[in-house]
Amino acid sequence: MKRKRMLSLGVAAVVLAALSAGSYAQGQFDKYTLKSPGDIAFSDFRGYESWEMVSSARTDTELKVMLANPTMIKAYKAGIPGNGQAFPEGSKIVKLQWKHEKSKEAPFVVEVPAAPTQAFVMEKDSKRFAAANGGWGYAVFNHDNATGTMTADAAKADCGQSCHVKVKNKDFIFHSYQKR
C-alpha cells in the first residue's frame, strides 16, 4: 500500500511539473499573439532575444537595452545614420526596460535589472507606416509581473510625431551603435 501511495505521489508530482512547465511555455508563447493598436505584431520581433545590442541607457527608475535585428546592425556597421542615409526597409529595434535595484551579491555598488516593465518596438516598413515617421512603426508591450505575461499597450504609440521627431536627422533613432 505504501509503495502504491508513493508511486501515486510521484506520478502526481510529474503531472504537476508538466502542467506548470506548459503554463510557463504558454505564457512565453502568448506574447507572440499580441498586436498593438497601431497594427504591429509582437511576432514581427520573434528572435529578438538573440539580436545584437545597440546601446543601453538608465533613467532614475529603469534600465534600458536596445537590440536590433541583423538588417539594422548591418546598416549601423555601414555607417547609417551618421552617413546621412536612412535605415533600410525591414530594420527592427527593441528597447527592453526593467526596474532596477542595487545588486545584493556584488561587492561594489551596481544597479541590476529587477522586474521587467516594457518592450518598446520599432520597425521600418514605408508601405505600412506614414512617411511623416520616416516609415517607422512604433508599439509598446507591457509586462505584467504578477502573471508573467505581456499585453499590448492600449495607446497607439506614435512616437515619430512626438518624441522621435527630435532625431529626424538620424532617421528617427536616438541611440547610436556603441563602439565595442
Image (cartoon, rainbow, N blue to C red):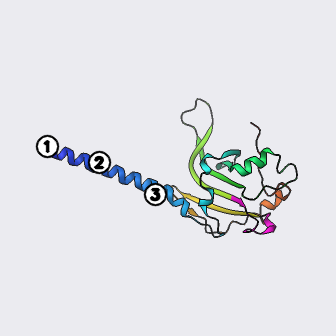
**Label 2 CA crowd tier, 10 Å (few <14, some 14–19, many 20+):** few
Q: Earlier in the sequence, mark 2 or mark 3?
A: 2
Q: Amino acid at mark 2?
A: Ala
Q: Amino acid at mark 3?
A: Gln
Closer to the camera, 116 or 85? 85
Q: Earlier in the sequence, mark 3 or mark 1?
A: 1
Q: Where residue 84 sits: x, y (%)? A: 88, 53
Q: Where residue 99 sits: x, y (%)? A: 60, 49
Q: Amino acid at mark 1?
A: Lys
As measured in the structure, the alpha-carbon distance from the residue carrying label 2 to the one carrying label 3 is 20 Å
Q: Where residue 69 sits: x, y (%)? A: 68, 51
Q: Is residue 174 above or below residue 3?
A: below
Q: Which residue is mark 2?
A: 13
Q: Which residue is mark 3?
A: 26
Bounds of the magenta segment: 122-134
**What residue do we see at 83% from left, 51% from top?**
81
Q: Residue 11 — which label? A: none
